[in-house]
Image: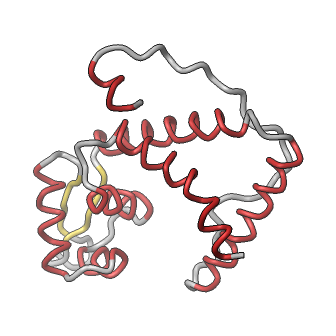
Amino acid sequence: MAAELDGATAALLSLWEAARENTTSRLSSAQLRAVMVVERYDGINLRRLAALLNMLLSSASRLCDRLVAAGMLEREPGRSDRREIALHLTPESARLLAELRRDRRQRLADVLAGMSDEGRQALLRGLVEFDRVARAREGESRPAVEFRSASPPPVQPRPAPDGPAAVRSA
């Protein structure tokens, strides 16, 4: 079963990567992961960020230096300990993440539109259960999304591509 799931998720991962390349091409995968962790844990300190990214503290510090220089993260002294640095998203990184999610959701909607309602519901049920079990294994109880039986969102037509960006996103 694991091998079949691994094979089936290749299309999903490809969709994710295409959306990432289309919207966040100026960030590396590690930088994007860091921004997403800071979004989830606003005010996180560098030590916790490094642990969540599975990085050395010095590597996480250099990564944050680059993200601050790029205008994606802000550093501020901690509220309880002024020596500790709290990390926050900038409006630019929040905009970039929103754009990434819109692109990803549109790509997902395009694929889901070709599936039967039963297939969509089964996929959602299975992924919600998978998420619950995976989070429980990591000691995290809050689900990413609650399951609710509903029709997929309407598919929005994609604008006609033009210019050099169209070649990159194809």
Q: Residue at x 26, y 79 (%)?
A: 55
x, y percentage for residue 149?
A: 86, 49
Q: Residue at x 15, y 47 (%)?
A: 70
The answer to which quarter of the image holds residue 140 is: bottom right
46 vs 97, nearest the viewer = 97
x, y percentage for residue 28?
A: 25, 54
Position above or below: 56 against 120? below
Position above or below: 55 against 150? below
x, y percentage for residue 15?
A: 51, 45
Q: Quadrant of the C terminus?
A: top left
141 vs 124, nearest the viewer = 124
Q: How many marks overall?
A: 0
The answer to which quarter of the image holds residue 9 is: bottom right
Q: Residue at x 72, y 27 (%)?
A: 154
Q: Quadrant of the N terminus?
A: bottom right
20 vs 90, nearest the viewer = 20
The answer to which quarter of the image holds residue 151 is: top right
Position above or below: 50 against 32? below
x, y percentage for residue 127?
A: 71, 62
- Residue, far right: 118
Q: Horizontally, is 127 left or right of 165 in the view? A: right
59 vs 87, nearest the viewer = 59
Q: Residue at x 89, y 47 (%)?
A: 118
Position above or below: 65 against 169? below
